[in-house]
Amino acid sequence: MLRRAFTSRTASLVNRSSFSCTSVRFYAGAGDDGAAKGDLLLSFTSPYEVIFKNEKIESVTVPAEEGRFGIYPDHVPTIAQLKPGVVEIVRNKETSKYFVGAGFVGMHPGSVCHISVTECFPLSDLDKSEATAGLEEAKRDALSAHDEKSKVENRIRVETFEAILAEI
C-alpha cells in the first residue's frame, strides 16, 4: 500500500518528457585518471593486510561465483562476488598466485581494479597434507553439528578445504 502510494505520488511529480534516457557503454580506459594506456592498476586487500596498492600489473584472473575470468587493461567496468579459489596476478611477466576466501572484485573506469577478500594466502604457503587433515576434521565437525549456525560454518570450512585441495 505504501509502495503504491509512494510510486503514484512520485509519478505525478515527475514530468516524463523532462527525462531523456540514452544508453551509453563505458569502457575502463575511458577515464582520464587512473592507469596509463596499457596498464592495469590493482589494489588487493584483506582485513589483515594490503597485498597490492595501486600497483601496475598486466592482468588478474579471479574465481567469481559465475566462474573464473580474467581482467586486462581497458576491461569493461564490472563487479563480481568471489568464491574461495586462486587469484592469479601477472606482473612484469611473472605470475603470483594467492588462495582467497570470499570477497568482491570491482573493475572501474581508468583501468583500475579493486579486489577485497576475507582471507588471502600465497598459494606456495599452503600444504596439501594440512589441507587434507583440515578437510577431514571439517567433515567430522559438519556431521556432528547440531545447530544451524554450526552446520553452515562447517559447510563453509569443507568447501574452502575442497577448493584449496583442488588448486594445490
Image (spheres, rainbow, N blue to C red):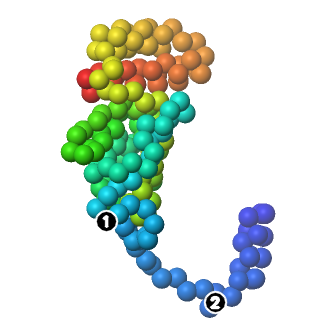
Name the residue rendered at 68%, 88% in the picture.
Answer: 15
Q: Is residue 144 above or below residue 66?
A: above
- Name the foreground residue: 90 vs 132: 90
Name the residue rendered at 62%, 91% in the picture.
Answer: 17
Q: Quadrant of the C terminus?
A: top left
Q: SS of the residue at dot 2?
A: helix
Answer whether labels 1 and 2 touch (C-beta < 8 Å). Answer: no
Name the residue rendered at 29%, 10% in the picture.
Answer: 129
- Mark nearest the camera among 1 and 2 is 1
Residue 43 coordinates in the image, percent (x, y): 44, 46
Mark 2 or mark 1, which is nearer the start of the sequence? 2
Q: SS of the residue at dot 1?
A: loop
Q: Hey, what amino acid is under mark 1? A: Lys
Residue 136 coordinates in the image, percent (x, y): 37, 9
Q: Is residue 21 above or below residue 33?
A: below
Residue 38 coordinates in the image, percent (x, y): 28, 62
Residue 26 coordinates in the image, percent (x, y): 41, 71
